């Protein structure tokens, strides 16, 4: 028997969508996390409610790598339809836990099989007819626990945490796990090399959160009071979490009054319109959607840019074009969102690279929107938004809200009513606004998407028009300086640099470890917002070759960066793109880099 | 013009706006005046008024009354969404929406209907001329069957009647009038503003420039020929606004600038505006007789408005601060701990 | 008395919108054109139906310059409201024809005034009350004719041509012109230097056409059979002309049947959807709109790109963002239309630079759409689309329609039903399609905006998905080679080059003449389509400095060109932008060029 | 399954499609089967059938019948526009649209209404489950007042009744049925396809997974609690499709999978489907009694369809060539000369 492989393996559960396996997978995940071992789950599910194949990949590494990996160490084969295909994915020496009835005739011989009569066990050991089918999934949790040696209290924790809101469900589920555990212990002798052992120091102070949960919490802490949305995968859960959190934290126990309005609109045009109307009237307002919704919001986005109304728009990206693959991830909306709407329109775009930043940017986006009186897009994606990520516990905000330049009745009294809605008094391009309901005769003005002068009066004057457009540019430059700065790691002092953003960060981190291990360290700059910081040019300046890594076909950030650079630096840029809907794995970065002779050995 | 002060301590002049840029004689201008009268008489506080509109000649009119109030001239057909959001942000605002028939019944029909379904607390006035004025006279979805546009083509589709659609959706306030009938329009505007919930007021408002109701079915004099032949290039004849004044229960034949006619039938005391089916009935009956029934068709004062249904607190959401909106440090830490 | 100035002057008529002045202006234009003199009218009108000021600028040059000019030689002051402002625009020595009643007290003394009692004359000489107001405009045509010496038969021609469809109107209008002419002759002696004299060789074989007329005719000749639209300035007239032409040329005199369907949709989402549905079913279909409509078409554009459905979309650009100035021109949609829709979406964009190309591209767009089974955008603008332009008479098409790769029943028989809707059999990325109604059991397939394999079957497979995206890229590259090539003029052999596109061409031509005259000739490349031709790089390669001239704030084409160049060439590019809603004048180009020392003396 | 050949010389199997990927027991699957039966019995030629849909579980179903026909699964809520265009391009096609209540009454409401107004010749089937199935159970605009979604929140808005709004627009064919009632659905589908003009068929089609009609208002056994508690994470219980069979004129109480009930009332011979007002009346009456009235509510066989109104020739526009579409060289030169 080979060297034991400890806390370094990937479990892949191949099941049927809607069969209840997701619950089992999450219990397994939480149990292992409870052992102090870093976990990185990726849920690969179909655009379907029931019946199609789905895969849950649970990556376990001592270093806490969070990127997807193609290597499968332990396969839980729970889907007859894909069984033969799934078998191929297991690495030699790997483990295959499968329903006994699946034929292994002329199947691979380089893997270790644990054939379990799941169906029979469920029939024999689970009383309730209605519950049998879904609890069968818990049985495999028990078997996996047996094979890897997951302690009972960790399993207990996993189940309790999973059914926090439904204590009644805890016991039945534990019983089912026990069935699997007992069956393993009574029938198998450990044949494989894989083990899980309690760790310390790796997950302390860490929690498991989905990006959409984090963003919803961020919005809540950012003071959102009006959220209008239209359901769409993978964005829906963001507003659904917001609703749950609002019920819990924003509801007056006595009156039942809610200190927030979450409206399910009739479509995305209405959703963003409601958010803009609310922001105009002084609320902190948001909407959340995905690609198709962004397309439908184009006209309103231009109105908010030009009439200068704050609004926060979350785009949880899925792979397009068009409907594309609604349950697959991508970074394909970056270029489109940046200049969303006809005419010369440009927007602030925040690019969270972790669930922690989903929380922080989801919160601060409202400050940026109010400060710059313009739409702020927060571009997350399916991988970040819908998977559980291990993260340091979020910090409580120390800053108060920044509501930007808003004139109160008192301000207007002080100014003797002398002000212009679009007058650049501070020279930063950011002008002052008033809110409806401000009790001063000079407060009112007319907001419009058509030509207006410094006092918000209608005009078709050529000079006034161009002047206002230039002022909007000035404002955009002010915003550039205020965005979250890129995060640089040039410790390697390499001549090679990587630039990435968003969920691609996980793969880049792992790739850098591997490259360093291979004696080819690379530096790294993670971009966190558009418009781009001047630091980007600085980083490129300091390196010979810079690879822009992203998850879209057309190298959208690669283009935006090239446009932002002095001509002399443009030639240093290379593009690495991954766009098959699966989260980018480290190999997608290491391979081109190791091939290209450019990398100094 | 009156110089007496209203409840808000303001003169009628305080309710005026910028000078109109609409065509002389446009029905919309009459409605603007009715609006000024109604808001003045109601004693609305200008700073609590939010004037909302879409895009069109009609949608320009909010600039022509209560200049000191906030206004939002949004994008075409999407005013209901902006209004919904603003109303949620600040329940105390008086939301007054002005739209056109194209803005409402063509591009905006979906939002119009969903606003009604939610019963947003707002007044929604349709300045209905059956045409796209600002884009020079194409048919809108409310154009009468068989009506002919200046360029000569005939409308071949059933008009969408905003009142009928609103009733079918259970709208809590549905009324119709005619721009020239100040006696009827002013009280209806007041009632609509007073109503808590979505009040739809469809005001027939002739477009003196493009909406040619009887069109080529009648043929006119030499002069008319020439007017047409020149007007279709760029000439806009100057007209007086049409005014009418007639009694409840009676039918009034109104001649429009191009010599065409519409028949207005004013609801009498016999109509019970609490009876939705009766309202549907009078509209259908009217249509059958070629009458446009005017007056308060239906009202349900008991219907709960959106903000109440959604349990929005009395303090405007816009005024809530960190204290009201953020979890306390303790709540926050406990909550995060649950994710361990 | 000074040197006579012959056939080289600019008339500016300042009038009130809706007063009927447009008719008078057109009569004047046609009369002068009839003298064989090149004319270039620009109509500056408000977003209003009646009452606001409007200006009609009629530029007259022996060379036939078509760009707007800021210099006013002859002012016809017909608007009391703007009279004082208008007066300022006249160049010294210029002519001011104004209503007598306008006060000239302490007005400029360096111009020549002809004070005419227009109102009185109208009252005295025009019988019909209803016609008096608008015919008053014709009186000024007579006065101008008198001042400049326009022969009567040319005036007659102008009136007849203008009222082609309304012969009854001819005489009254001529009578009104006569009133003005007589008044001038009876009351004034010529004091100014301006003259119009019959020319030969300048306008022979030329006609006066609006770009939207030309595009409508192009679409008609291109075989459009379904056009769905929603009214919007400045695009409406395109479909309105199409309707008029269809009534005339596509209607069966007996049955009244129309060989085209022009549908006024409820909005732009529906308009483009109808066009896509029609193309899918085999018609040649189009829609026409302007900026706000383009924003609303974003979602459907992505569907057509990804499901590969042909469709032609005309965008008659006006200045944005948002509603912007609906009656002012711009080239502000280029960047947005090129990548319209979320995800990795890219489109073919045609950029007509003249009314002749509005006709040709409007016609050929349908061939491109069918060949590449994708949306084709035709980007015109308000200046090109709504103004009259002098142009060589259009040529009758010699090519037949190119319907692209469509499989008939016979083809399918031959293939024994073996085909795949998205199978790249020819290696050019362009695949074969069938139309609904094709009587073969293998003809039917399922069109969708979600993931599909080579046989149009639904898939979520990562490899299949990426493969299809790569094939779409291949198709786009094939299209690149098939687009109308850029038009180069390097005769000057200068080290300086200009790149422009669309209506900017007029100003560039004039600017080049002036620069050449100033001893600083520049070369010129006019881009005519996206994706960009490799010729662009070649042109940049051959020059030291290349200025990209365009009518938008953000230098949208400047960016697209930079992205298309090898890094080494990027540094050569400069950007010249004009964006106040007025058509770009030659000065906007000559001034920066003459300033920059870069230009060799 | 029958092996006899229909008018088109095809067996029933020729009308099958790909295997469904919808939940076992989904009402939509029943409708798919009714569709197959109806198309087979009508003897529709597959190559002349155009299956149109939007986005949703319901909109996926066109892939599950008549595999050899062309289908177009467009974008969410915009199927009417695609259908309108396709119908104009080729009048001979049989346009068969399948949509959901979200696709139709939420995002698609405007297009749905305007398609009806134009009376496009197509069959428009709404597989109506009052919820967004594919996005996991949020309320749609047809959700009943007070119904509770799996996640627990209560719908507080008046449902939009597609049949009521269709009638308000004078739709030329309006019917309602229940997915489990093959006896009624099949003939209605046939009638809808036979009808020349827009035929709206609203078929109540329970979502076994998310649409929880009586929701938490009834509390069930221990088992039910646990089902819920687990299901809300990822478990989809397996159900049989609901089947019903009842007589005209009678009311039938149907129990759904979650134990909730709907009351169906089948129109009797006494209802005259030519009488629009009567149709409105029965719907209102039904609502008052908590009945969902099923059957052919209204039909106007005389209404002219869009293509006829627009004078589209019999030869499909798609088949016209240069000869039919271009001006002749002479016409062209003359025309250009006019611009001199
Ligand atoms: C998205 C969009 N499409 C089209 C237009 C052009 N447009 C401006 S107003 C208008 C119609 C106005 O008609 P209506 O609402 O009846 O107002 P009216 O001018 O008749 O009062 C249209 C189509 C636009 N502004 N935006
Ligand atoms: C523009 C856009 N917004 C949102 C979505 C997400 N989405 C897919 S299906 C659906 C609703 C489907 O509900 P319904 O039409 O009732 O169909 P059902 O699944 O209930 O049969 C939504 C919101 C989308 N695909 N496109
Ligand atoms: S065009 Fe018609 S609607 Fe517009 S202002 Fe003139 S009269 Fe009124
Ligand atoms: S989720 Fe509901 S609507 Fe969708 S397939 Fe399942 S049962 Fe049918
Ligand atoms: Mg109108
Ligand atoms: Mg549904």
Image (spheres, coloured by chain):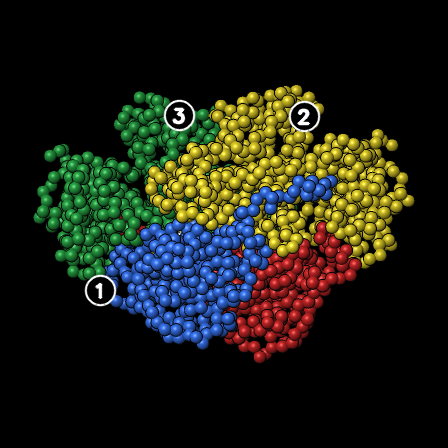
Chain colours: A green, B red, C yellow, D blue
User: Are there few (<14), some (14-19), or many (20+) residues within 10 Å of tag 2?
Assistant: some
Are the residues under badges 1 and 2 in a single subunit? Answer: no
Viewer-side label of 3, 2 = 2
Are dots 1 and 3 on a single chain? no
Q: Name the residue: 14% across, 56% down.
A: A125
Mark nearest the camera among 1 and 3 is 1
- Circle 1: is it few (<14), some (14-19), or many (20+) Cα within 10 Å? few
Label 1 with label 2: CB-CB less than 8 Å? no
| Residue name at image x 67 percent, y 62 percent | B213
Where disc 2 sits, the SS reads: helix
* Chain where mark 3 sits: A
| Frontmost residue, B190 versus C470 | C470
Mark sitting on residue D222: 1
Q: Is residue B320 above or below residue A348?
A: below
Q: Position of residue C385 (x, y in %)?
A: 64, 42
Q: Mark 2 belongs to which subunit?
A: C
Quarter of the image holding residue A69? top left
The residue at label 2 has a CB less than 8 Å from ligand 1 = no
Q: Residue at the location (36% across, 53% down)?
A: D14
**The residue tagged with tag 1: helix, strand or loop?**
helix
In the image shown, does D262 or B267 lie closer to the viewer?
Answer: D262
Residue under numbered circle 2 = C515
Dot 3 crowding, Cα within 10 Å, few <14, some 14–19, many 20+: many
Give residue A401's position: percent from left, percent from top. 43, 49
- Number of marks present in the image shown: 3
Residue D239 in the image: x percent, y percent? 27, 60
Secondary structure at badge 3 equals strand
- Which residue is outermost to the bottom? B270
x%, y% of residue D180? 34, 65
Real-space CA distance between mark 3 and mark 2, rounded to the nearest whole angstrom: 42 Å
Query: Which residue was labeled with disc 3?
Result: A545
């Amino acid at each position: 028997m080979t060297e034991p492989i400890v806390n370094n393996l990937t479990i892949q559960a191949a099941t049927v969508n809607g069969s209840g396996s997701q619950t089992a997978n999450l219990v397994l995940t939480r149990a292992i996390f409870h052992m102090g071992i870093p976990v990185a789950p990726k849920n690969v599910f179909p655009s379907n409610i029931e019946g199609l194949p789905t895969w849950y990949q649970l990556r376990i590494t001592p270093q806490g790598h969070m990127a997807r990996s193609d290597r499968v160490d332990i396969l839980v084969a729970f889907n007859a339809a894909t069984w033969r295909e799934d078998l191929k994915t297991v690495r030699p020496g790997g483990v295959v836990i499968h329903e006994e009835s699946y034929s292994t005739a002329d199947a691979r011989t380089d893997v270790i099989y644990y054939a379990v009569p799941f169906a029979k066990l469920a029939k024999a050991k689970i009383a309730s007819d209605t519950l049998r089918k879904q609890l069968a999934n818990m049985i495999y949790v028990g078997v996996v626990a047996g094979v890897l040696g997951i302690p009972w209290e960790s399993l207990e924790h996993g189940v309790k945490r999973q059914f926090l809101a439904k204590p009644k469900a805890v016991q039945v589920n534990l019983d089912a796990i026990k069935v699997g555990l007992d069956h393993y212990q009574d029938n198998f002798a450990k044949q494989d090399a894989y083990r899980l052992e309690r760790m310390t120091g790796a997950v302390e102070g860490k929690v498991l959160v989905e990006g959409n949960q984090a963003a919803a919490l961020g919005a809540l802490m950012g003071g959102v009071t009006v959220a209008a949305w239209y359901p769409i995968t993978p964005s829906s859960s963001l507003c659904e979490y917001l609703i749950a959190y609002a019920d819990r934290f924003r509801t007056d126990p006595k009156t039942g009054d809610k200190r927030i309005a979450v409206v399910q609109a009739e479509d995305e045009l209405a959703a963003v319109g409601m958010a803009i109307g609310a922001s105009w009237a002084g609320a902190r307002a948001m909407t959340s959607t995905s690609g198709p919704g962004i397309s439908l919001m184009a006209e309103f986005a231009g109105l908010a840019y030009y009439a200068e109304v704050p609004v926060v728009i979350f785009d949880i990206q899925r792979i397009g074009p068009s409907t594309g693959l609604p349950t697959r991830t991508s970074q394909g909306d970056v270029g489109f969102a940046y200049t969303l709407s006809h005419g010369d329109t440009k927007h602030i775009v925040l690019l969270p690279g972790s669930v922690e930043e989903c929380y922080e940017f989801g919160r601060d986006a409202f400050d940026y929107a109010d400060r710059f009186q313009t739409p702020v897009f927060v571009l997350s994606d399916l991988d970040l938004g819908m998977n559980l990520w291990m993260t340091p516990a979020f910090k409580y905000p120390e800053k108060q809200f920044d509501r930007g330049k808003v004139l109160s009745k008192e301000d207007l009294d002080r100014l003797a009513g002398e002000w212009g809605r679009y007058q650049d008094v501070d020279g930063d391009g950011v002008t002052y606004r008033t809110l409806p309901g401000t009790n001063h005769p000079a407060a009112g003005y007319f907001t419009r998407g058509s030509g207006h002068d410094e006092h918000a009066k209608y005009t078709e004057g050529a000079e006034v028009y161009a002047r206002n457009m230039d002022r909007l540019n000035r404002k955009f430059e002010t915003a550039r300086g205020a965005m979250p700065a890129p995060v640089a790691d040039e410790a390697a002092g390499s001549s090679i640099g990587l630039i990435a953003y968003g969920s691609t960060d996980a793969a880049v981190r792992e790739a850098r470890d591997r490259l360093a291990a291979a004696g080819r360290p690379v530096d790294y700059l993670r971009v966190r917002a558009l418009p781009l910081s001047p630091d980007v040019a600085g980083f490129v300046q300091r390196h010979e070759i810079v690879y822009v890594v992203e998850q879209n076909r057309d190298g959208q950030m690669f283009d935006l960066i090239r446009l932002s650079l002095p001509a002399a630096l443009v030639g240093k840029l290379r593009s690495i793109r991954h766009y098959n809907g699966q989260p980018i794995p480290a190999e997608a970065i290491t391979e081109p880099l190791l091939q290209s002779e450019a990398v100094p050995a | 013009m009156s110089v007496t002060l209203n409840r808000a301590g303001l003169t009628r002049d305080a309710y005026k706006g910028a000078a109109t840029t609409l065509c002389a004689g446009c029905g919309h201008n009459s409605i603007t005046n009715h609006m000024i009268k109604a808001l003045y008489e109601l004693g609305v506080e200008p700073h609590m008024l939010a004037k909302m509109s879409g895009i069109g000649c009609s949608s320009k009119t909010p600039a022509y009354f209560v200049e000191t109030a906030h206004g939002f001239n949004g994008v075409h057909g999407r005013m209901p969404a902006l209004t919904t959001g603003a109303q949620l942000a600040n329940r105390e605002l008086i939301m007054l929406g002005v739209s056109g028939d194209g803005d409402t019944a063509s591009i905006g029909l979906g939002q119009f209907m969903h606003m009604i379904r939610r019963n947003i607390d707002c007044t929604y006035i349709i300045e209905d001329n059956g045409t796209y004025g600002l884009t020079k006279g194409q048919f809108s979805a409310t154009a009468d069957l068989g009506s002919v546009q200046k360029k000569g083509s005939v409308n071949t589709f059933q008009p969408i009647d905003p009142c009928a659609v609103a009733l079918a959706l259970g709208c809590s306030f549905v009324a119709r009038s005619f721009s020239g009938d100040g006696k009827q329009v002013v009280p209806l505007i007041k009632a609509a503003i007073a109503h808590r919930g979505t009040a739809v007021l469809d005001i027939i408002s002739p477009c003196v420039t493009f909406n040619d109701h009887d069109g080529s079915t009648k043929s006119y004099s030499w002069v008319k020929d020439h007017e047409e032949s020149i007007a279709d290039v760029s000439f806009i004849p100057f007209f007086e606004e049409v005014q009418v004044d007639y009694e409840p229960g009676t039918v009034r034949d109104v001649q429009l600038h191009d010599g065409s006619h519409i028949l207005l039938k004013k609801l009498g005391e016999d109509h019970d505006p609490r009876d939705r089916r009766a309202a549907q009935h009078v509209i259908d009956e009217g249509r059958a007789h070629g009458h446009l029934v005017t007056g308060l068709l239906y009202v349900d004062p008991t219907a709960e408005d959106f903000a109440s249904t959604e349990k929005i607190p009395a303090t405007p959401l816009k005024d809530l601060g960190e204290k009201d909106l953020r979890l306390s440090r303790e709540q926050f830490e406990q909550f995060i701990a649950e994710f361990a």
